[in-house]
Amino acid sequence: MANSSPLTFRAVLTSPDSNDRELAGLRRMWDGGPLRQFGETQASCHYVAYSSPFLTGYAGSYVCDGCLRPSPGVCRVRQESKWLCGACKEQMRRLGGRQ
């Protein structure tokens, strides 16, 4: 289901291009959807133009709900209702589904 006003987050993340810390805008791509770096301007060459009926701007990497770090991809973990990177998903599996 599309969300007419996606949630917006501000978080300190490690830039994939450097060792510096940067303030990045994060948005849920839809209600219950994954977090993604997002901005009104193209922050780097890794951001792509994105347009939907409810959201327009530049989208960067997906961001894990567990560690809040940029990731090449995230998977929905239904038991937790979270979108997790591979490392966080594996950690959850080793802990028997508890975090």
Image (cartoon, rainbow, N blue to C red):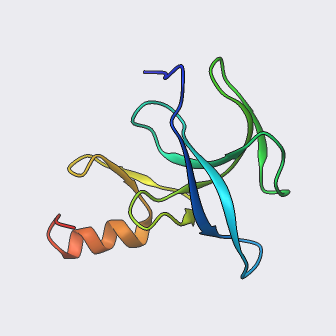
- Of residues 26 and 16, the one nearer the viewer is 26
Q: Position of residue 33 (x, y in %)?
A: 45, 38
Q: In the drawing, does residue 64 fall left or right of residue 25?
A: left
Locate residue 92 relative to residue 34 in the image: left or right: left
Q: Residue at x 51, y 36 (%)?
A: 7
Asked whether residue 11 appears in the rendered view, the answer is: yes
Q: Quadrant of the N terminus?
A: top left
Q: Residue at x 44, y 63 (%)?
A: 85
Quarter of the image for the C terminus: give it. bottom left
Near-viewer residue (99 or 74): 99
Quarter of the rendering containing residue 84: bottom left
Residue 78: x and y in percent read: 26, 46
Q: Residue 43, position in %: x, y?
A: 82, 54
Q: In the figure, 92 relative to 51: above or below?
A: below
Q: Hey, which quadrant is residue 52 in on the image?
A: top right
Total count of labels = 0
Could you tell whether 49 is left or right of 6 in the image? right
